[in-house]
Every structure is written in C-alpha cells, then in structure tokens.
Amino acid sequence: MGTAELAYGLDQTVSAYLEDQGLPVEHFQEIQQDLLNALADTLQERGLADHDSIAYDDFGNADGAAVLGALDGHLHALLETPLHPEPLLEFDASVGHEIQGFDY
C-alpha cells in the first residue's frame, strides 16, 4: 500500500464516520486532523517515527503528508502489534457502579 492509497483510505474513513454519526461535512477537516495527530502519536509511542520526522504547525497539528509517509513505511509493524485500548468506562467495585473515564 502506498501513501496515495493511505490518503484515500483516510478520507473514506473520515467520510464514513461523519455519515455514521450524522455529523455535518464541516467537521471533516477537524476529524481528519485529529486522526492524523493520533496516528503521529502512535507512531512516535511505538518508536516508528521521532518527533523531528513529522512536522507540526503552530497549533500542534501533525503534517498529513509526513504522517502518511511514516505510516506507509511502518504499516506492517503497526498491524502486527496488538492493541490494548483503554476503556472509556471503568468499573469501580468499591462503589458498585460505572464511573466515567476521561483518558482517551
């Protein structure tokens, strides 16, 4: 898979998310940038890209082309690494009910 295919897939994913959630198209850029920032963080956390290899603007947003380029070079490594997402809700046994977790 190349960078162009990754860019197309990203666009399709964001478009499908907007449609599924019933969000207006005006949110496309914001959601796409959030996804690019999350991908940049994941690449850096897993040692597949350092902070200098992905340019950031003054608002802390990762450069899309740099993220997709790094992702293209390490896609197989990411797919082979098991993911352990943090739950959005946690159960507190001491009080016997769910409490909202905000670490996402």
Image (tube, rainbow, N blue to C red):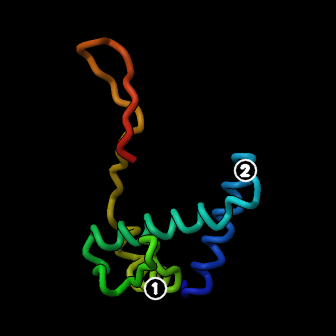
Task: Describe the element under mark 1 as helix, strand or loop.
Answer: helix
Location of residue 65 with respect to 90 vertically, above or below? below
Would you identify the image quadrant in which residue 50 lies? bottom left
Location of residue 91 with respect to 102 vertically, above or below? above
Pick the quarter of the image with the N terminus.
bottom right
Asked if marks 2 and 1 touch (Cβ < 8 Å), the reply is no
Q: Check disc 2: other Cα within 10 Å, few if <14, some if 14-19, many if 20+.
A: few
Q: Check disc 1: other Cα within 10 Å, few if <14, some if 14-19, many if 20+.
A: some
Would you identify the image quadrant in which residue 82 lies? bottom left
Left/right placement of residue 33 relative to residue 98 reads: right
Task: Describe the element under mark 2 as helix, strand or loop.
Answer: loop
Q: Whole-percent x and y of residue 59?
A: 45, 71
Q: Whole-percent x and y of residue 23?
A: 72, 50
- Residue at figure coordinates x 37%, y 48% from the top left: 85
In primary-sequence order, the first of circles 2 and 1 is 2
Q: Whole-percent x and y of residue 62?
A: 45, 76
Location of residue 14 with respect to 53 vertically, above or below? above
Q: Whole-percent x and y of residue 33?
A: 54, 68
- Residue at figure coordinates x 46%, y 83% from the top left: 72
Left/right placement of residue 68 relative to residue 23 reads: left
- Residue at figure coordinates x 37%, y 35% from the top left: 101
Mark number displayed over residue 66? 1
The Cα atoms of the two marked residues, 2 and 1, are separated by 27 Å
Q: Which residue is mark 2?
A: 23
94 vs 1, nearest the viewer: 94
The amino acid type, in three-letter code, at marker 1 is Ala
Left/right placement of residue 38 relative to residue 34 reads: left
- Residue at figure coordinates x 37%, y 15% from the top left: 97
